[in-house]
């Protein structure tokens, strides 16, 4: 993974700089501290790009359909992945997460994600996106309505070692249920 390679490069670069400076005067120490700060800054920029790239890759594969989505889950999620659903339920492990996503694809086979914003903080990616799809199969006990829905979602994912290990999602549940006709729209 690029993240691990960058860490190794940064460590080797710092060791080379420090070990090659035989003089431990004040000037050399200041230079070394500046080098450490610059190297760490470069590493965090690379880390942020890698985390965003992983998230984009997941969405690109998701948008190719159910088969590609199942494959990208295997590729990018840790086996002990935990997903905290909007419904309040937690999904533990790859098997149950894939089952949940498979059910979603069965209900909305043409679903598509459009990324709005992504922000990286430490080992987390926060994304705001729009999901569209046509309700063609049972979903959460709701029989197919053949209605096209559009909903916003905000998701935060924690990534360790180049893999998703935990995710939290919240979406416009009320608007979603209103579009499906399950909950009446408020009067104007």
Image (spheres, rainbow, N blue to C red):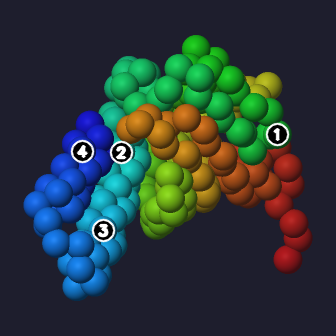
Could you say whether the residue bearing mark 2 is in a helix, strand or loop? helix
How far apart are the alpha carbons under marks 4 and 2?
A: 20 Å
How far apart are the alpha carbons under marks 2 and 3?
A: 27 Å
Could you say whether the residue bearing mark 4 is in a helix, strand or loop? helix
Q: Reading the chain from its start, which is encountered first: label 1 or label 4?
A: 4
The residue lying at 70 percent from left, 52 percent from top is 170
Dot 1 corresponds to which residue? 88
Q: Please identify the quarter of the rendering in which residue 65 is found.
A: top left
What percent of the width, then of the height, locates residue 98? 55, 21
Residue 163 versus residue 22: which sits nearer the camera? 22
Q: Reading the chain from its start, which is encountered first: label 4 or label 2?
A: 4
How far apart are the alpha carbons under marks 1 and 2?
A: 26 Å
Dot 3 corresponds to which residue? 36
What percent of the width, then of the height, locates residue 181? 77, 46
Is there a contact, CB below 8 Å, between mark 1 and mark 2?
no
Is there a contact, CB below 8 Å, between mark 3 and mark 1?
no
Residue 92 versus residue 122 in the image, above or below: above
Dot 2 corresponds to which residue? 54
Q: Is residue 66 left or right of residue 150?
A: left
């Amino acid at each position: 993974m690029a993240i691990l390679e960058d860490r190794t490069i940064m460590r080797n670069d710092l060791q080379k700089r420090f070990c090659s400076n035989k003089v431990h005067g004040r000037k050399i120490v200041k230079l070394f501290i500046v080098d450490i700060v610059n190297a760490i800054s470069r590493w965090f920029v690379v880390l942020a790009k890698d985390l965003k790239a992983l998230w984009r890759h997941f969405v690109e594969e998701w948008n190719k359909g159910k088969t590609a989505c199942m494959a990208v889950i295997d590729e990018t999620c840790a086996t002990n992945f935990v997903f905290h659903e909007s419904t309040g339920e937690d999904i533990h492990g790859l098997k149950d997460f894939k089952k949940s996503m498979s059910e979603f694809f069965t209900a909305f086979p043409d679903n598509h994600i459009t990324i709005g914003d992504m922000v990286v903080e430490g080992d987390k990616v926060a994304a705001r996106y729009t999901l569209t799809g046509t309700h063609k199969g049972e979903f959460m006990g709701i029989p197919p309505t053949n209605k096209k829905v559009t909903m916003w979602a905000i998701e935060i994912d924690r990534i360790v070692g180049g893999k998703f290990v935990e995710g939290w999602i919240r979406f416009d549940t009320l608007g979603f249920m209103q579009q499906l006709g399950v909950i009446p729209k408020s009067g104007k």
